[in-house]
Image (cartoon, helix red, strand yellow):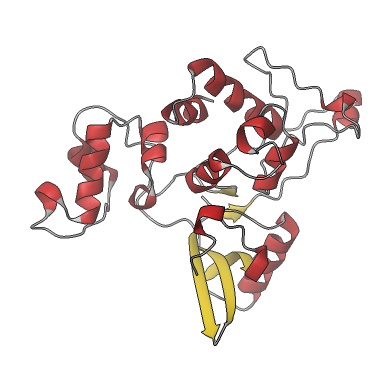
Amino acid sequence: MTTLTNLFEYWQMSPADAGKLADVLLGWMQTGYVYATAVTPDYTNAQIPYAEPQRPMRSFSELAAIDYAKDVFFDENGLPNANYWRLVNDVSIFAYPQPNVNGANADVLAAAGQYTDTQMQAISGYLAGTGQYAQEGRQWFQSTATLSAIAGAGGNAAPFGTTISALRILVTVHEGRSMYRLSAVVAPQGGATANTTNATNATAAAASTSTTAATPVTNASQPSSTASSAATAAAASQSINYPYTILEILENDEIPQNPSDASQP
């Protein structure tokens, strides 16, 4: 909860609102979660009753069903707002142990690494080859020891890795006025995986004496298709011995797009 709360506070949300938002998201995703704030989601009294699935989100569209979160991430017409697109840019609904510091934005560096603006400027300069690193040119972190040295005292390099867990590939083909767009997310061996944990049946769980282990929630960057399609793609890629696993393939209008970028190919 701390990382999510830090993220939303970095967004300039009040500590109370940041904690509340993190609380409802974790309550939606984790098995047996006990709410830590005064929030009391009541999904059973909805027009069509439902319950928290108690497994990691498989699509950012699920945010529209989460109490309080739907007011933060969608406008009065039910359309994704700026907060929605910022979250999409900050976190991932694929599962992997550590975000890659080489691709982490300021929000993630502040939330997971608790770095200050000055430290993030140093990290950015090292990666871009600007400022005091202009003579060296663009570089990338190959170890967290280098990250700690560049950032200086303070912050926490431990949550970060330095290798790619998932890579989004965007392809755009033009012919005259026609345009075809393809978006694919691939993972190397040992990299990210699709969340395929089944939702928890709250009624059955309450009646059973057995317990179900909670699925770890990994937060760290882009929209996803359904778990079934991701699992099918993953199985297919492995069967033909690709050196990577295809986690997602989307075409044309299926690719979620920030309205502010709608005019860009």
Q: Position of residue 236 (x, y in %)?
A: 67, 72
Q: In what quadrant of the picture does the N terminus appear?
A: top right
Residue most toward the top? 38
Left or right: 185 in relation to 135: right
Quarter of the view holding residue 239: bottom right
Q: Residue at x 68, y 39 (%)?
A: 63
Q: Could you tell me which residue is drawn at 68 percent across and 18 percent down?
A: 34
Viewer-proximal residue among 254 and 222: 254
Q: Nearer the viewer, residue 211 or 203?
A: 203
Count of marks placed on residues: 0
Does residue 169 appear left or right of residue 125 in this picture?
A: right
Q: Nearer the viewer, residue 242 or 227?
A: 227
Using the image, determine if residue 138 lies above or below residue 154: below
Q: Position of residue 142 (x, y in %)?
A: 27, 53
Q: Is residue 141 left or right of residue 230?
A: left
Residue 148 rendering spot, x and y as whole percentages? 23, 38
The one of 27 and 45 positioned closer to us in this rendering:
45
Q: Is residue 114 visible?
A: yes
**Could you tell me residue 67's position as x and y percent?**
72, 28
- Look at the image and tell me whether residue 91 can be seen: no
In the current view of this chain or complex, which residue is farthest to the left? 135
Q: Is residue 91 above or below residue 15?
A: below
